[in-house]
Image (cartoon, rainbow, N blue to C red):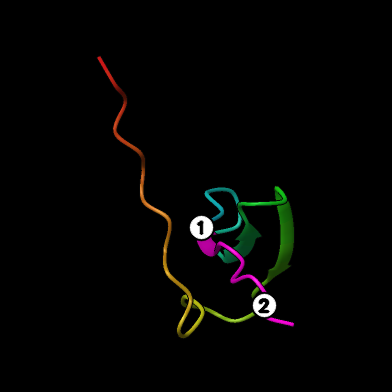
Amino acid sequence: MPTKKRDIVQVKNPRSGRYVKVDRTRGLILGHKKSEGPYANVPIARKRKTAK
């Protein structure tokens, strides 16, 4: 049974300055880093362009 690839990205928390992993398909926070820097091999979410 093939599994679907989840849409997991990381974003920087502006209050703490640490990175947080987010599952965009389910809308859940998966974890946060205690150390400095981003997660390895997890894409960083960028701001979406708004349609005019």
Along the viewing direction, whichever of 13 and 11 lies nearer the viewer = 11
Q: Name the residue at 59% across, 49% down.
A: 15
Q: What residue type is labelled 1?
A: Val
Q: State which region is magenta.
A: 1-11
Secondary structure of residue under mark 2: loop
Reply yes or no: does residue 36 show up in magenta. Answer: no
Number of the label disc, if any, that sits on residue 34: 2
- Residue 42 percent coordinates (x, y): 48, 75
Mark 2 vs mark 1, foreground winner is: 1
23 with respect to 48 (left or right):
right
Residue 45 vs 3, above or below: the answer is above
Residue 38 vs 51, above or below: the answer is below
19 with respect to 51 (left or right):
right
Does the CB distance between marks 2 and 1 fall below 8 Å? no
Q: Which amino acid does label 2 sit on?
A: Lys
CA–CA distance in space, label 2 to label 1: 14 Å
Number of the label disc, if any, that sits on residue 11: 1
Secondary structure of residue under mark 1: strand
- Residue 18 percent coordinates (x, y): 56, 65
- Residue 30 percent coordinates (x, y): 73, 66
Along the viewing direction, whichever of 24 and 2 lies nearer the viewer = 2
Q: Quadrant of the C terminus?
A: top left
Reply yes or no: does residue 4 show up in magenta. Answer: yes
Q: Quadrant of the N terminus?
A: bottom right
User: Label 1 neighbourhood size at 10 Å, few (<14), some (14-19), many (20+)?
Assistant: some
